Amino acid sequence: MKTIYLLLFLMSLSSAFSQNTESVNKQYFHLKLKVLDVNNRKSIEGVFLKLYTRNKPERIDSSIVKNGFAIFKLEKGNDYELLAQLDEYLTQRANFNAACYQQDSSKVFCVSGMDIEHISKLSKQINLIEASMSMKKINLNDVLGLEHIYYDFDKWEIKKDAWEGLHNLIQLLKDNPNIKVELGSHTDSRADEVYNMILSQKRADEAVNFIVKKGKIAQERIIAKGYGETQLLNRCKDGVNCSEQEHALNRRTEIKVLGYKINNKVPAQQRGTAISGARN
């Protein structure tokens, strides 16, 4: 019996030592983040930042930018996503992948949607990453180009390679539930103007139907509008000899902001444990 108790005691010591060693060996990043206006590059105050891990849908931390920045503690080995929200600005997403060294040993971390400005070492286990995100102020009638949403000549069906662009639009509408948009479809100059106007309207209707059904977006938040060949992006008007690639640039879909609502405040209970500039 004494032998059994001794074995159990040694096993518990081993487990405790293992957990303590694991904790000591963990490495962290302190992400000091500021948010800038994409046009004037000035710092924006009051931005609500939400932090997620990519493998979990729920928020794990949050903060509000005060006195120029907020700080998040990130553990090496996790893939994080940040959501920046503020009234009158489009919600911005950024990714801080503290696990990409597992795929490429030459990389410490990978980012998208933010710019790294400075890296310093606070201790053996903690690095300070100073970075910035940019946000675009919402202006009525602003046009947001959508990548990869093109159409075959004389067709209006959604191509499979356009799904990514439409899913990006669905994400934009979900991230910004207070905006209303117009989805405008454009043709090249081939065929006559009346036919092109009808074709572009069919393309716009098809794209809107895809967004409403696949993304479960309310129909009243998005309007389909066909422009035909009235807003060409290049020289390829009637009678001009152009390549297929040049014509394809004009067969496009764009988003125009028609309106938005303002919430005015972030509920106090949405605050997390991350540090804002005001608390340093």
Image (cartoon, rainbow, N blue to C red):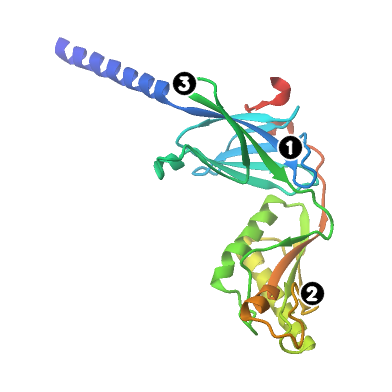
Q: Residue furthest top?
A: 2
At label 1, counting other C-alpha atoms closer than 10 Å, the crowd grade (few under 14, some 14-19, many 20 or more) is: many
- The quarter of the picture where residue 212 lies is bottom right
Q: Amino acid at mark 3?
A: Lys
Q: Element at badge 1?
A: loop
Q: Where is the N terminus found, in terms of image quarters?
A: top left
> What is the distance, in whole Å, between disc 1 and disc 2 at their CAs?
36 Å
State left or right for residue 34 relative to residue 45. Answer: left
Which badge, 1 or 3, comes first in the chain's sequence?
A: 1
Q: Amino acid at mark 2?
A: Gln
Q: Residue furthest front?
A: 241
- The quarter of the picture where residue 204 lies is bottom right
Q: In this figure, which residue is indicated by the disc labeled 3?
A: 124
Q: Residue at x 67, y 63 (%)?
A: 146
Q: In this figure, which residue is indicated by the disc labeled 2?
A: 231
Residue 245 is situated, as x and y percent measured from the top left of the image, at 62, 76
Which badge, 1 or 2, comes first in the chain's sequence?
A: 1
Q: Element at badge 3?
A: loop
Q: In this figure, which residue is indicated by the disc labeled 1?
A: 47
Residue 28 is situated, as x and y percent measured from the top left of the image, at 50, 28
Q: Residue at x 47, y 33 (%)?
A: 76
Q: Element at badge 2?
A: loop
> What is the distance, in whole Å, between disc 1 and disc 3 at their CAs?
31 Å
Look at discs 1 and 2 and give the one toward the viewer.
2
Which badge, 3 or 2, comes first in the chain's sequence?
A: 3
Q: Amino acid at mark 1?
A: Val
Q: Where is the C terminus found, in terms of image quarters?
A: top right
State left or right for residue 112 relative to residue 63. Answer: left
At label 3, counting other C-alpha atoms closer than 10 Å, the crowd grade (few under 14, some 14-19, many 20 or more) is: few
